[in-house]
Structures are given as C-alpha cells and as structure tokens.
Image: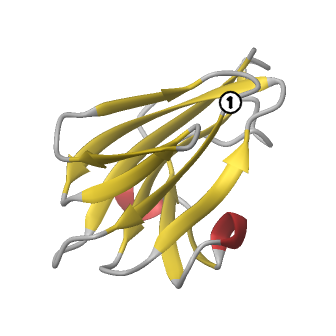
Amino acid sequence: MIKHSKDLRTDIVSNFRGGKGEIQMTHFLETEKNEFNAKGRLFAKNVLKPGTSIGFHEHVGDTETYVILSGEGLVNDNGDQKPVKPGDVIITKNGESHSIENTGTVDLEVMALILFA
C-alpha cells in the first residue's frame, strides 16, 4: 500500500493538551482503518509554530515517542526541562508525563508515535 502525502489527513488543533496556540497534525496511520493492528493509536508529524506547545500530560496505558525532525524546543520530561534539537528522541513511558514547546524562530517538526503498553 502507498499513501500519497496529498491523501493524508491533516488536523489543526488549538490548545492541544492545554498547550499554547495551534499545532498541525498530519496522520500517517488511521485507527479507523485498522492500520495499527490494535497496537497503537497515533503515528503523525506535529508542526508547532514558534511559541506554540503541546501541554503537559500523562500517558496511561500507552507510550509515546517523539523524534525531533527540525527546529528547536523545550521538553518537560517528568518535571525536568530539557532542550531538544533535530535527531533527539524523547520516550515517554506508561505512567510518565511530558510536554513540548517550540522555543525557536522556525517551525518545530516532531514525529510522534503512540503504542499501547
């Protein structure tokens, strides 16, 4: 199967998880089409404009992995604030919490994958 970029669902989400501003979320897999084989619920690229964020939230029953594709940001990793840049990987396990904010001057692009624990 090939999914062309023009056919991918893109959402604009305001104040995601209590964060600031709007993020753009492009979905690579869809749960409604059983593309996760019941093993996960999100595989997407999130684009955060400068000053926007995904709010601090806990993962219950799943794990989320971020891969920073471009831009710079600040991650709250279970209460520890850490800067991130392209190539960095953030793993938030079941029961852990995180947030991310674009602290740079260009878009922060983040690949996000949520799998069930």
The percent position of residue 108, horizontal first and vertical second, equals 28, 63
Q: Is residue 40 left or right of residue 105?
A: right
Q: Residue at x 18, y 60 (%)?
A: 71
Q: Is residue 20 left or right of residue 37?
A: left
Location of residue 52 with respect to 40 vertically, above or below: below
Q: How many marks?
A: 1
* Label 1 residue SS: loop
Residue 95 seen by the camera: yes
Q: Residue at x 33, y 30 (%)?
A: 89
Location of residue 6 with respect to 44 vertically, above or below: below
- Residue denoted by label 1: 96
* Residue 47 image-quadrant placement: bottom left
Q: Residue at x 30, y 80 (%)?
A: 50
Q: Residue at x 75, y 38 (%)?
A: 31
The quarter of the rendered structure image containing the C terminus is top right
* Residue 93 image-quadrant placement: top right
| Residue neighbourhood size for the residue with mark 1, other residues' Cα within 10 Å, grouped as few (<14), some (14–19), many (≥20) | some
Residue 4 seen by the camera: no
Residue type at tag 1? Glu
The percent position of residue 116, horizontal first and vertical second, equals 75, 20
